[in-house]
Image (tube, rainbow, N blue to C red):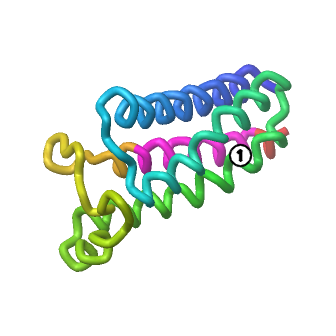
Amino acid sequence: MSKINENILLAIWAVSFLATAGSLFYSEVMGYIPCELCWYQRILMYPLIVIYGVAAWKKDINLALPGLILSGIGMFVSTYHYFVQKLPALQEAGGACGLVPCNFQYVNYFGFITIPFLAGTAFIIIFVLHLVLFKQNRRK
């Protein structure tokens, strides 16, 4: 594996680690109770630390394929969750999401950055970097 691919794997691992640490910070330190869609995003994000960590450690891109699938699904869940929070047409759908309504916004930085936005950004970065890995791997 080339040094570039190793660095990309480490970058993906770092993004997944920061996203996981951020979600744990919001729930465990700030006391924000995750809604149902937040739990789904966590279920998709947390394994990425192990998947990309093992792939980087063993220097085997093929071990990271499940990460591409999980991050792809995570992009859609995060996007839907963000739309539930921000689009008036979907706001009612998120009201009966569970213990905490999925349309509730604990944070709203700059008027558009919410927790699903942050998770979605992490999923997109991971997905795109993984596609770059595929492209780099095909050149050889």
Q: Residue 24: x percent and y percent?
A: 44, 32
The residue nearer to you, when weighing 119 against 126, is: 119
Q: Residue at x 50, y 34 (%)?
A: 20
With respect to residue 10, does 12 lie above or below? below
Residue sitting farthest toward the left: 111
Amino acid beneath label 1: Lys
Q: Is residue 118 magenta?
A: no
Q: Residue 15: x percent and y percent?
A: 52, 32
The residue nearer to you, when weighing 20 against 76, is: 20
The residue nearer to you, when weighing 116 against 140, is: 116
With respect to residue 63, does 78 lie above or below? below
Indicate left or right for 92 with 130 as reference. Answer: left
Q: Residue 52: x percent and y percent?
A: 70, 34
Q: Residue at x 73, y 46 (%)?
A: 134
From the image, tell me which residue sits under label 1: 135
Q: Residue 29: x percent and y percent?
A: 34, 26
Q: Residue at x 43, y 46 (%)?
A: 119
Circle 1 sits in a helix, a strand or a loop, which is it? helix
The residue nearer to you, when weighing 30 against 59, is: 30
Residue sitting farthest toward the front: 99
Question: Over which residues does the magenta segment extend?
Answer: 119-136
